[in-house]
Image: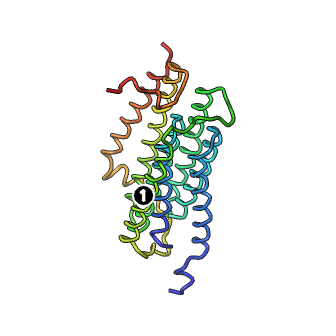
Amino acid sequence: MTPSADLLVAQNVGFYLIAAVMVLGALRVVTTNNVVHAALWLVVVLSGAAAQFVLLAAEFVALTQVLVYVGAVMVLFLFGVMLTRAKIGAERELNNKGWFLGIPVSVLLLVTLVIALNDGFGSERMPVDVAPMDTAVVSDQIFGPYLLPFWALSFVLLAAVIGAIVLARRD
Amino acid sequence: MLLNQFLFLSAILFCIGVYGVIARKNAVLVLMSIELILNSVNINLLAFAMRNGNADGHTFALYVIAVAAAEVGVGLAMVLLMYRNRRSIALDELSEMRG
């Protein structure tokens, strides 16, 4: 194996660029004063996650991410924003009174996670030359050994659809 | 590529999502932070799927996406109901069940 094949410069550059955009977008989601902007920054994060999924050789999951999250869930969020407030634009009072307590909690959590991950996986490398995961293999998994959770998931979706209709309809 | 770079990215997104859940008062923004958390879980699942070379992580990432979609649907219906009854979606005003 040549050193350049091991380093994977293009993948690494792509990863860090997308990761920087994702972290920036996620920070804006939780700090912006405008609910619509938060939704649009969330689109950036979710699309970046789809790009990372391609980098992780998971093309079908990346496509599903774009279709379901960026397509459907974001439309749902924007409808939620529209239906719960007429006001478009910056506003005050999006944060709790004790919002600053979130900073030590999340920083402590991050430090713990980083230490644990560093301890556990150190400098373990991803396998090189991975072919994209075959969608047929994924479907064989879903309809083979993982059929029972798939059934449970169908019932969850059915219950969610009925529940959403029951909750949101006007009597 | 290191395995850890994906795990660190997902840890950072997870912590940002946790901060959002704690700090935000607006119910829609809390739901968005939960989406951030679920996405970081998906990155983890797919990173380990690539490391182990099997499709289990892909399967569960798809399940997580479906559950997240259901959760957003029900969550936004509840937020809508809350807005209809109280003209506000501030979560700290929901204190009827305080003991």
Residue B75 rendering spot, x and y as whole percentages: 46, 33
The residue shown at (49%, 23%) is: B81
Closest to the observer: A147 or A115? A115
Residue A72 rendering spot, x and y as whole percentages: 56, 39
The residue shown at (35%, 70%) is: A120
Determine which residue is flagged by label 1: A108
Residue A34 rendering spot, x and y as whole percentages: 64, 39
Closest to the observer: B4 or B25? B25
Taking the image as drawn, is residue B49 in sight? Answer: no
In the figure, is residue A146 to the left or right of A34? left
Residue A78 vertical position relative to residue B81 in the rendered view, above or below: below
Taking the image as drawn, is residue B47 in sight? Answer: yes
Badge 1: chain ID: A
Q: Amino acid at mark 1?
A: Leu
The residue shown at (36%, 71%) is: A119
Residue B82 rendering spot, x and y as whole percentages: 49, 24
